[in-house]
Image (cartoon, rainbow, N blue to C red):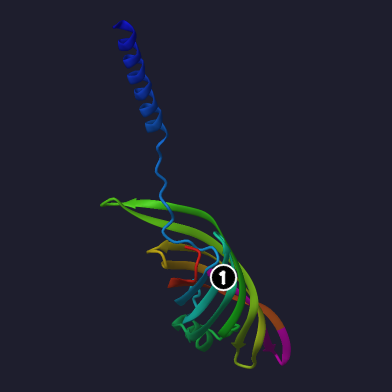
Amino acid sequence: MRLPLLCVICCLLAAGARAEDSGDTISAVQKRPLRQAHRLELLPYGEMSIADPYLQRWGGGLRAMYHLREGLSLGLDANGLGTWQTQELVIAKRELHARILDSRERASLTALASIAPLYGKVALPGDALVHFETYVDAGLGAAWTETDATHGIRPALAAGIGQRMFLGEDVALNLRVGGNVYMERFVIDGSPTTKAMGFWTVSLGFSVYLGGGR
């Protein structure tokens, strides 16, 4: 009787140990709600200039980026801007007779490369999770600009930092702050000269992802 009883006890202890080991190795990994690799991202957006006391710019554009893998993409950005003088510029020209170089960018086309080094998630009340991604981009292109005396296509550079907040498998909210620099042609005292001009913008839009890769 003792030997069969001992065998039963050993079997129960072994089963308990296996169950405990199995419980220790169970893990849950939450998948990203939106996969970007090998997908086309279309981003319509609106934008406005910031930190410019003389000119206020409003406009919008469309960005198309193809994601080679998660966190790396290449694409094109096309946008248009309307420009208005602020009251400070009007006063400076009319009353102070200040010589201010006034350049207005009307449109641009830029080839961009983007990387996303930071991905994370934030817990909200109600057990909701918001997944986000921080990215930086830079590119080279051309801008259509004009001044009081000149107009034409100028070489331009653009760079920025942005935040994507994923809203589902195919949509993300996109917020970006960027800088734009281009070479403008001026006529000063009858002599042509070239100067670097630039401005900052903040843009907001919705990214829509097309294609496979989910």
Note whether 66 is above or below 131 in the view shown: below
Residue 155 sits inside the magenta stretch: no
- Residue farthest to the top? 2
Q: Residues within 10 Å of mark 1 (few under 14, many from 20)?
A: many
Residue 19: percent from the left, percent from the top?
36, 28
Residue that label 1 marks: 66
Residue at x-position 44% and y-position 67%: 174
Foreground residue among 162 and 66: 66
- Residue farthest to the left? 126
**Helix or strand or loop: what does disc 1 sit on?**
strand
Give the quadrant of residue 136.
bottom right
Q: Is residue 98 visible?
A: no
Residue at x-position 41% and y-position 62%: 166
Give the quadrant of residue 138.
bottom right
| Figure disc tally | 1
In the picture, the quarter occupied by the N terminus is: top left
Note whether 138 is above or below 84 in the view shown: above
Give the quadrant of residue 110.
bottom right
Residue at x-position 39% and y-position 32%: 22
**Residue type, numbered disc 1:** Tyr
Note whether 159 is above or below 101 in the view shown: above
Residue 86: percent from the left, percent from the top?
46, 82
First to last magenta residue range: 178-193
Residue at x-position 36% and y-position 24%: 15
Foreground residue among 208 and 53: 208
Q: Is residue 68 visible?
A: yes
Residue 178: percent from the left, percent from the top?
53, 69
Residue 149 horizontal side relative to residue 174, left or right: right
What predominant SS class does the magenta segment belong to? strand
